[in-house]
């Protein structure tokens, strides 16, 4: 749902009215606690201003661990403002009790200490955010470098595929390669011829017809002593 300008204006107006009424009550309480006119006028700004600063810190810190400190500071400042307004309404007119005057006097230095610490915490949050951004940028650069390397590798693979022999050339190369089975078959045929020659039952021509080779091949494979004897 979209926030309209009317919604924003209404929020700002109510906040301004609430701060004005709270300022009036707290300024009167500070004056009755013994502060001078200028100090009494500034005292409500310390209390309610601390609420505004803590609220902004809660919103801007996101999910950082320091957000807990911002919430604690916001709770303490809101409690001080509420208690101060309630005391202004409940206490009788005139100077307040010394204990209440002491609390009023203690609020400004405590607020100064809290705001100083909040400034340090805000600086740490900003530093952590910048470090996280730097890490994200480094991861993005690393991912881009890896992607470029993969792209270059794929390009080299494509170039290697293009320079490899064509399918037809590979088929010719495979066809020209001697097959071990054929060499083994020639050895078996020769052994068969030698076995038939050793039996001495068939002539060279008959062995050639039996085995399926030429008669000259049978004579070439015939042992030398048999050739001499023949």
Image (cartoon, grey):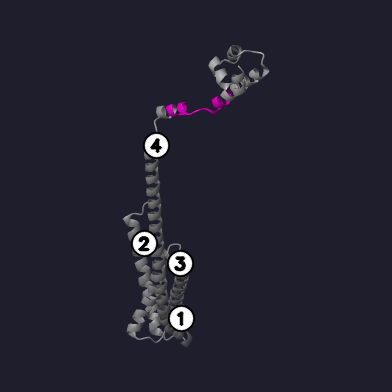
Residue 225 in picture, x, y percent from top left: 61, 22
Query: Looking at the image, which is closer to me, 112 or 46?
Result: 112
Q: Which residues are magenta?
A: 172-185
Q: How many marks?
A: 4
Instruction: Report the residue marked by disc 4.
Output: 161
- Give the Cα distance between marks 2 and 4: 69 Å
Mark before the other along the chain sequence, 4 or 1 = 1
Q: If you read the primary sequence from the N terminus, does the residue marked by circle 3 or circle 2 appear first?
A: 2
Few, some or many C-alpha atoms within 10 Å of disc 4 (few <14, some 14-19, many ≥20)?
A: few
Rendered image quadrant of residue 55: bottom left
Q: CA distance from mark 4 to mark 1?
A: 94 Å
User: What residue would you read off at disc 3?
Assistant: 67
Q: Judge whether 134 appears above or below 41 on screen.
A: above
Instruction: Say if mark 3 contacts mark 4, CB within 8 Å.
Output: no
**In front of the other: label 3 or label 1?**
3
Nearer the observer: mark 3 or 4; the answer is 4
Callout 2 secondary element: helix
């Amino acid at each position: 749902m979209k926030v309209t300008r009317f919604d924003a204006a209404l929020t700002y107006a109510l906040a301004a009215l609430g701060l004005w009424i709270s300022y009036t009550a707290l300024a009167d309480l500070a004056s009755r606690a013994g502060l001078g006119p200028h100090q009494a006028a500034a005292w409500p700004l310390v209390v309610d201003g601390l609420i505004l600063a803590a609220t902004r810190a809660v919103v801007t810190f996101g999910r950082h661990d320091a957000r807990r400190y911002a919430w604690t500071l916001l709770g303490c400042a809101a409690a001080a403002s509420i208690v101060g307004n309630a005391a202004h309404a409940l206490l009788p007119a005139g100077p307040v009790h010394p204990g209440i005057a002491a609390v009023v006097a203690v609020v400004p230095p405590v607020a100064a200490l809290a705001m100083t610490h909040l400034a340090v915490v805000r600086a740490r949050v900003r530093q952590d955010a910048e470090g996280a951004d730097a890490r994200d940028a480094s991861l993005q650069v690393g991912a881009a470098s890896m992607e470029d390397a993969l792209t270059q590798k794929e390009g080299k693979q494509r170039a290697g595929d293009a320079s490899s022999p064509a399918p037809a050339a590979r088929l010719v190369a495979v066809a020209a390669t001697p097959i071990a089975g054929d060499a083994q078959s020639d050895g078996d045929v020769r052994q068969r011829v030698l076995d038939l020659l050793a039996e001495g039952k068939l002539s060279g021509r008959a062995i050639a017809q039996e085995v399926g080779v030429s008669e000259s091949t049978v004579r070439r494979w015939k042992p030398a002593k048999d050739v001499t004897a023949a």
